Image (tube, rainbow, N blue to C red):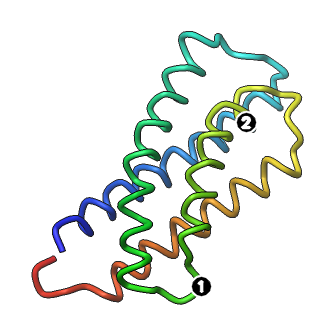
């Protein structure tokens, strides 16, 4: 069960990254400015990539073991891909608002559902 507390922590971190991406996107849209790729975009995108690549197999294993309602391995894979994409797109003001918001919302939904399920399925050692 130790890995589930790690999953919870990684999921929380990804949720925070997702919210940062949404905030960066709002800022870039409002100002119309593109930030510096090497000082802002790349470090954030790299952090999200490392975290999501570590998170994905743990989350897939958890979904396979626990079988939470309305969460599936493919959603986990898509969420990992989507958060990597939004971590880059967030900094470009010409990104489609509709598509970006849709990705942010679906990422948020999956991550929140995982946290809810981990809370509900708490074992005594957590």
Q: For numbered disc 2, what is the local secondary structure?
A: helix
Which quadrant would residue 91 be assigned to in this image?
top right
Q: Around disc 1, counting alpha carbons within 10 Å, would you say few (fewer than 14), some (14 to 19), or many (20 or more)?
A: few
**Looking at the picture, how far across and down is residue 17, in whole percent?**
51, 44
Numbered mark located on residue 45 in the image: none
**Looking at the picture, how far across and down is residue 8, in whole percent?**
33, 64
Query: Could you say which is closer to the camera, residue 29 or residue 13?
Result: 13
Residue 18 is left or right of residue 3, and the answer is: right
Quadrant containing the N terminus is bottom left
Residue 49 is left or right of residue 81, and the answer is: left
Q: Residue at x 42, y 72 (%)?
A: 115
Q: For numbered disc 1, what is the local secondary structure?
A: loop
Residue 19 is left or right of residue 15, and the answer is: right
Location of mark 2 (residue): 25
Which quadrant would residue 6 be assigned to in this image?
bottom left
Q: Residue at x 65, y 10 (%)?
A: 36
């Amino acid at each position: 069960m130790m890995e589930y507390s790690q999953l919870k922590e990684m999921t929380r971190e990804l949720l925070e990254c997702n919210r940062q991406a949404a905030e960066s996107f709002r800022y870039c849209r409002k100002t119309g400015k593109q930030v510096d790729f090497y000082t802002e975009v790349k470090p954030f995108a790299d952090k999200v990539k490392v975290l999501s690549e570590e998170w994905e197999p743990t989350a897939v294993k958890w979904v396979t073991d626990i079988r939470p309602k309305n969460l599936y391995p493919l959603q986990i894979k898509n969420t990992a891909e989507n958060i990597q994409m939004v971590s880059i797109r967030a900094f470009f003001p010409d990104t489609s608002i509709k598509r970006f918001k849709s990705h942010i919302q679906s990422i948020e939904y999956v991550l929140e559902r995982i946290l809810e399920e981990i809370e509900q399925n708490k074992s005594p050692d957590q």
